[in-house]
Amino acid sequence: MPRNRQQIPREERAGDLLAAATELFLSKGYAKTTMADISAAAGVARGNVYWYFDSKDDIFAAVMDRMLSREIRTLSAEQAGADPLSRLVRGLSDMRYSRPLHQAMHDRLPHSEAVRVAHNTFLDWIVGLVDEVMAERGLDGDPDIDAALLRDSVVAVFEGANVPNDRNRPAHEMIRLLMESVLAGRSPVKRA
């Protein structure tokens, strides 16, 4: 027997909204998805969506955080013994399906603190894995390597690869090349 909607815990209802929003954002894109679409897909009254999320940007940020959290859990389970570079490359490769949503985040960055926080969380994950690669290879304290420049370069490659054009290779391939070059000592990020 179905439960009365009032008996559904808040977390479960928010999860239903996030699941519906994820599917819609991936299939229709951020711009073409409305809060009405999300409420209808989740079976929640249109006005009630705002009890759970203040705005479309807030639900979008929560969707992106949820996708990243899932990827981190998946990598932890499936790549537990893998080196940090392999985890970074695998994670970025796995998340290619969400590339249009990452592009939409860039459009929303100037307009939404929630989206900025979600975007920074994603970039912090990338930087954390770069730091793990450096530590694993014993380069985290290497005075010849500009770690900040390496982090910034990896982020720039990732962000630049998300600008739509026909010439870019996938970010994970370019980042692997950049990191392997640094680790092999052929780096433009060595200190002068």
Image: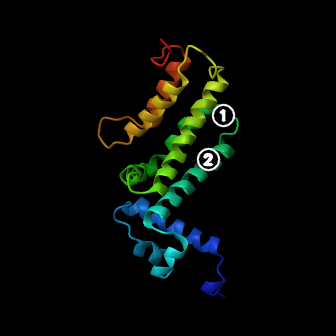
* Left or right side of 107 for 149: right
Q: Nearer the viewer, residue 157 or 19?
A: 157
Please give the label number shown on residue 37.
none
The crowd level at tag 2 (other Cα within 10 Å; few <14, some 14-19, many 20+) is some
Element on which disc 2 rests:
helix
The x and y percentages for residue 40 are: 45, 78
Residue at screen point 49% across, 69% down: 54
**Residue 80 lies in what quarter of the image?**
top right
Q: Nearer the viewer, residue 30 or 112?
A: 112
User: Which residue in the structure is indicated by mark 2?
Assistant: 72
User: Which residue in the structure is indicated by mark 1?
Assistant: 82
Element on which disc 1 rests:
loop
Image position of 73 with respect to 167: above or below: below
Q: CA distance from mark 1 to mark 2?
A: 13 Å
Front disc: 1 or 2:
2
Residue at screen point 64% across, 70% down: 11
The x and y percentages for residue 192 are: 47, 11
The x and y percentages for residue 75 are: 63, 44
What's the amino acid at mark 2?
Ile
The colour scheme of the drawn protein is: rainbow
* Left or right side of 50 for 128: right
Quadrant position of the N terminus in the picture = bottom right
Residue at screen point 50% across, 15% down: 190
Q: Nearer the viewer, residue 47 or 27?
A: 47
The reply to whether discs 1 and 2 touch (Cβ–Cβ < 8 Å) is no
